[in-house]
């Protein structure tokens, strides 16, 4: 039986990830064996929350030009290890695109991404809808019976 084994050489580095080649082979095997899509996404590919995706899109829409993945991660609080999952999710939905003028690879922290022009209205509508859902109705605010909070410095 032929097998592929992944061994971490430098175990002192935290957050070590398998190579893309290894993950692709494992994913292909899981699909061939009929693993459920939800299982593959959760345990092999990882997951990025909808909140994380919205933060990334909100940041990119607020920028005049594309931003590199390092800046995107830092400005949105996204873990660097989750950047490939985020990129795959947003490119798969057609929301973002890599700037082809750069030489950086798809997941390199220097790779620049921008929102796709044809999707900007859809992105804006989605972000606006999310913002509207976060509002508290005026009628539900009770200033008379609200507890007073005093902070002494």
Image (cartoon, rainbow, N blue to C red):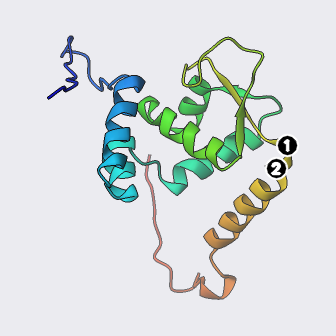
Q: Position of residue 65 (x, y in %)?
A: 81, 29
Furthest toward the front, the residue is 1
What's the residue at 54%, 32% (across, down)?
73
Q: Position of residue 6 (x, y in %)?
A: 22, 22
What's the residue at 31%, 36% (across, down)?
26
Judge from the rendering whether residue 42 lies leftward or rightward of residue 105; answer left or right: left
Q: Tell me, yes or no, whether the two marked residues, 1 and 2, touch with CB atoms within 8 Å.
A: yes
Q: Label 1, secondary structure: give it.
A: helix
Q: Marks 1 and 2, Cα distance to the nearest angstrom?
A: 5 Å
Q: Label 2, secondary structure: give it.
A: helix
What's the residue at 66%, 82% (across, down)?
137
Quadrant (top left, top right, bottom left, bottom right) of the N terminus:
top left
Q: On screen, 102 above or below 56?
A: above
Quadrant (top left, top right, bottom left, bottom right) of the C terminus:
top left
Classify 10 Å Cα crowding around label 2: few (below 14), some (14-19), many (20 and above). Answer: some
Q: Which mark is residue 9?
A: none
Q: Quadrant of residue 14?
A: top left
Judge from the rendering whether residue 2 lies leftward or rightward of residue 34; answer left or right: left
Q: Quadrant of residue 10?
A: top left
Q: Which mark is residue 117?
A: 1
Q: Which mark is residue 120?
A: 2
What's the residue at 55%, 20% (across, down)?
109
**In this view of the protein, which residue sits in the foreground, 96 or 128?**
96
């Amino acid at each position: 039986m032929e097998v592929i084994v992944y061994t971490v050489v430098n175990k002192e580095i935290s957050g070590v990830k398998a190579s893309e080649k290894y993950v692709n082979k494992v994913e292909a095997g899981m699909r061939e064996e009929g693993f459920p899509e939800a299982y593959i996404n959760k345990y092999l590919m990882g997951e990025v929350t909808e909140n994380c995706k919205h933060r990334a899109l909100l940041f990119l829409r607020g920028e005049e030009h594309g931003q590199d993945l390092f800046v995107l991660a830092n400005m949105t609080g996204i873990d660097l290890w989750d950047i490939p999952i985020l990129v795959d999710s947003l490119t798969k939905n057609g929301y973002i695109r890599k700037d082809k003028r750069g030489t950086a690879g798809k997941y390199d922290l220097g790779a620049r991404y921008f929102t796709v022009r044809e999707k900007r209205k859809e992105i804006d509508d989605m972000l606006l809808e999310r913002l509207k859902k976060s509002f508290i109705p005026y009628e539900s605010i009770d200033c008379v019976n609200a507890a007073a909070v005093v902070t002494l410095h």
